[in-house]
Amino acid sequence: MSRPAQSGDLIADRYELEELVGTGGMSSVFRARDLQLDRRVAIKILHEHYAEDPEYLERFRREARAVAKLSHPNIVTVIDRGDDGGRQYIVFEHVEGENLKEFVLRAGRLPVRGALELALAVADGLAFAHDRGLVHRDVKPQNVLLSREGEVKVTDFGIARSLHVDHGVTQTGTVLGTGEYLAPEQASGKQVSAATDVYSLGVVLWELLAGDVPFVGENFVAVALRHVNEPPPRLRERRPDVSPRLEAAVDRALAKDPGRRFPSMVAFANELRACLAEVEGDPAPPPEDDLAMTLVTPPARAPARAPARPRQPRRARRRPLVWALLALIVAGAAFAAVLLLGGSSHHNGGSNGDGTSGSVVQLQGVGNYVPSGSADTHADTAYRATDGDPSTYWYTQTYSTQDFGGLLPQGLGLVLRADRSVKLSQIKVTTPTSGLVAHIGAGNSQSGPFTTDSTRQTVSGTTTFTLQGRTAQYYVVWITSLPSTAGGYMAKISEVTAKS
């Protein structure tokens, strides 16, 4: 057996390894170049000691053949499999972007509609696999890839599953999944089924809505025991804008007994579609049976809703535009945004009404901040955001769905300068393009770097950011998601004011 694979190696006289992007207990994954077709691919190489085990090697080959038959827009495509001098490898399409876990850690809990769109894309891919006899067994956000074009793709269908303590242990030879997303039957060493994936996807959806997983613990065993023995926390206590029907759907997916979950991934997906129709204000079909009907009494006093916005004409939903849908719901659901931000104050003009006192600090818009270094074309309009005239504004260029789908991978900022270093208590941002998502950063140079100085908020009308107390001369309104407009995705800021 040759040495372990490393960057620069040529596999099967075709795949040139460029960079190690991940490693686990059983395999390593490289970004590579397919020299024959001049394209980038991902290649998974089995660790040497597993490649020498005939039983595991046959399983690896068998599962690779099964996954290679899964041709679905929500499943990462297997391109090739082979043996190169004892190195067992599988070649996948390369997805340029990030995984769902990275996105949630960056963006926080998602709007209800966006969470449902993502969960549905995953459910559709898993249902396709189940129909062809393949259970994933390790559904988790890390195994959901989000492309820069907005595609959602499930990866790692039972291939080279890790056995080390961070990813699961077994005494029977059955490989377990990841602790936080582990179905009770997996934790108990029992047989897995399609219902196992339903449970794990239920945990993923719970996390997308609540911002964290339902069960945490000091180690794998502690978390696994909680999955076996404890009911999940009430979702609507963490996220009040979740409907009773959606909470009931998640609860059913998380039933301890596999027989009490949805009978199939298709059934789970159908119920999520009904919940999505409910969010969109469309008539939703009744639940398929009594198990899906859980009576939840609504709060005695519902939070006041923001004024209703005119509904836009419905467009046919296209799964590759899931990020565009996320941007649209941020733009069109001020009520959900208030709940999402934990009660932060949003005002559509007028005084802030927050009782904050302090001296007014004059800021001057001086340019843009783009961490990637590619300048936005309208940096010269920055001064308009601080000229005292609400009819003028700083604005970004217009991005298409193919660019970012409304989400800015590293953010784009409006840079503001005070006449001296100062500790600000608040910054108010007024926009005519409600729905942009931003936070405030502070630094000592117009070119950055900037340190986060507020929580992330959705800016609608006039929104107040309460700062955390950093002293700086430069501040940035750092936008991470753009609202949808008629021509694409862009944002305007008409006024920024500040108090110390």
Image (cartoon, rainbow, N blue to C red):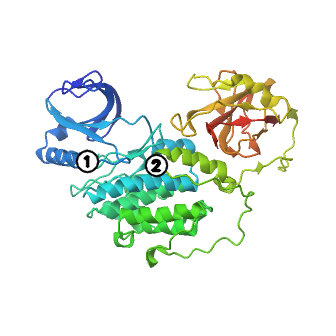
Image position, residue 228 (x, y; %):
38, 65
Instruction: Give x and y (percent) for residue 378.
Output: 68, 25
Q: Foreground mark, 1 or 2?
A: 2
165 is higher (above) or lower (below) than 238: above
Crowd class of label 2 (few under 14; some 14 to 19; many from 20; radius 10 Å): some
Q: Amino acid at mark 2?
A: Arg
The amino acid on which the numbered mark 1 sits, given as a three-letter code, is: Val
Report the Cα–Cα distance between label 1 and label 2. Answer: 21 Å
Q: Give the residue at x 75% y 42%.
A: 466
Marking on residue 421: none
Q: Which residue is mark 2?
A: 319
Q: Is residue 31 visible in the rendered structure shown here?
A: no
Quarter of the image where one finds residue 183: bottom left
Q: Which SS class for mark 2? A: helix
State the residue in front, 216 or 37. Answer: 37
Q: Looking at the picture, does residue 37 appear above or below residue 132?
A: above
Label 1 crowd bin: few (<14), some (14–19), many (20+), radius 10 Å: many
Find disc 1 in the rendering and name its residue.
Answer: 67
Q: Nearer the viewer, residue 187 or 336?
A: 336
The structure residue drawn at horizontal position 39% and vertical position 66%, both measured from the top left corner, is 267
Apparent side of residue 222 relative to residue 403 in the rendered image (left or right): left
Residue at x-position 50% and y-position 71%:
285
Name the one closer to the observer, 26 or 121.
121
In the image: residue 386, left or right of residue 191: right
Check contact, mark 1 vs mark 2: CB within 8 A: no
| Residue 47 shows in this picture | yes
Horizontal side of residue 45 vs 184, given as left or right: left
Report x, y in % for residue 383.
78, 25
**Compared to 363, does 218 lie above or below?**
below
Quadrant assignment, res 156: top left
Q: Secondary structure at mark 1?
A: helix
